[in-house]
Amino acid sequence: MIINKKELARAKVEKIKAGYSAYAETKEVTELVKKELAKLGIEVHIDQTELGSWFIPVKK
């Protein structure tokens, strides 16, 4: 099974936009999510570990 990392990152960004947290397992997906969130101006708290990164939306 081939997983498109860009599609995976977009799905995680959509989840964050809906107000939910998202988890990225790889550094590549983490970087794609960070770039997309920065482009959209969405503020999140990022909890990075050796196993992956959690993106938690900041509620204003």
Image (cartoon, helix red, strand yellow):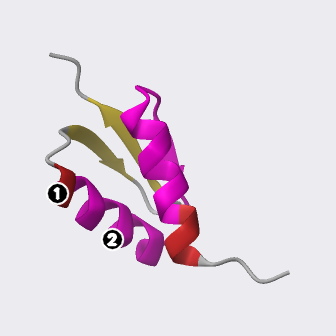
Q: Which residues are magenta?
A: 9-38
For the C terminus, give its image quadrant.
Answer: top left
Residue for badge 2:
31
Question: Residue visible at 36% across and 70% down?
Answer: 32
> Quick check: 55 left or right of 50?
left
Farthest right residue in view: 1
Question: Residue visible at 24% across and 66% down?
Answer: 35
For the N terminus, give its image quadrant.
Answer: bottom right
Within-10-Å neighbours for mark 2: few <14, some 14–19, many 20+? few
SS state under label 2? helix
Vertical arrangement, residue 57 with respect to residue 29, above or below? above
Number of numbered tags placed on the structure image:
2
Q: Quadrant of residue 31?
A: bottom left
| x and y, in percent, of residue 46 in the image | 29, 45
SS state under label 1? helix
| x and y, in percent, of residue 13 in the image | 42, 49
Task: Name the front one of labels 1 and 2.
Answer: 1
Q: Earlier in the sequence, mark 1 or mark 2?
A: 2
| x and y, in percent, of residue 49 in the image | 41, 55
Does the magenta run of residues contain 53? no
> Quick check: 59 left or right of 4?
left
Label 2 is placed on what type of residue?
Glu
Residue for badge 1:
38
